[in-house]
Image: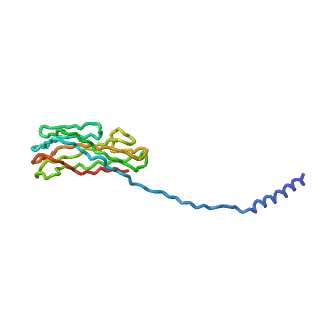
Amino acid sequence: MNLSIKKIAVVAVPALLSLSSFSAISKTASFTASVEVKNTFELNVVDQLSFGKIRASADTTGTTQATLVMPANPNASAVVANTADAVIAILEEGAPAKFTIEGVAAFTELTITDPTETDITAKDSAPPGAAAFKLGTYEYFVVEGADAGSLVVANKIQVDGDGKATFTLGATLSTDGSTPTSDYIDGAYEGTFSVEVAY
C-alpha cells in the first residue's frame, strides 16, 4: 500500500514540473476609435408667407385694430375680425409659409423660436405717419414628420425616421394701432422675418 502511494507521488511531480516549464504566449492588436460630429442641419424656405390681396383701413383717430388670421393649417381658411374704425376685407386668399428640415437624427425633437413681432410697411414711398401692419401670434402645422397633420404644440416639432420634417407657419396680420396720421396706400407691403429651429 505504501509502495503504491510513493509511485504515484513520483510520477505526479515530473508532470507538474513539465507544465510550469511553458511560457505564456500573447499577442497585442492596435485599433482606433473615431466619431464624426454633425450638429448642423438644413432649414429651407419653400413658400413665403402671403396674406393675399386685401382692402384695408386703419383707425386714424384711435387705437382699434382689425386682424387677419392666416392659419398654419394649409387646409383652413383665413379669418378676419373688424372694428367700426379698422377694416380688412379679403379680395384674394393668401397662404402660410412653408419650411423643410433635413439632416437630423431620426425622431429628434427640435424647438421653433417665433419671429420677433415687427411692422410690415409699404414697399413704395408712403407719406410720413402712414399706416403699417403688424405681424405676430405665430403658429405652426406639421405637414410631414412624426406628427404629420397636426398643429405644433409648445413650439416642439419631431422629425420622422428619415430625419426630415415639413411645417407651415401661420400668423396674424393686424392693422396699425398707433393712431397713424394717414391711411394705407395702394401697393405691396412687406417685412422680413426670421424663424429659428434648434436642438
| Quadrant in the rendering for residue 169 | top left
| Quadrant in the rendering for residue 73 | top left
Q: Is residue 85 left or right of residue 8?
A: left
Nearest the viewer among 8 and 76 is 76
| Quadrant in the rendering for residue 22 | bottom right
x, y percent for residue 187? 15, 47
Nearest the viewer among 156 and 166 is 166
* Callout count: 0
Q: Residue at x 44, y 56 (%)?
A: 37
x, y percent for residue 137? 25, 43
What is the basis of the colouring in this image? rainbow
**Placement of 44 over or under 30, stated as above or below:** above
Q: Is residue 133 left or right of residue 23?
A: left
x, y percent for residue 125? 13, 53
**Placement of 85 over or under 113, stated as above or below:** above
Q: Residue at x 23, y 41 (%)?
A: 94
x, y percent for residue 27? 64, 61
Nearest the viewer among 179 and 50 is 50
Q: Is residue 3 left or right of residue 47?
A: right
Nearest the viewer among 122 and 107 is 122
Q: Residue at x 27, y 36 (%)?
A: 76
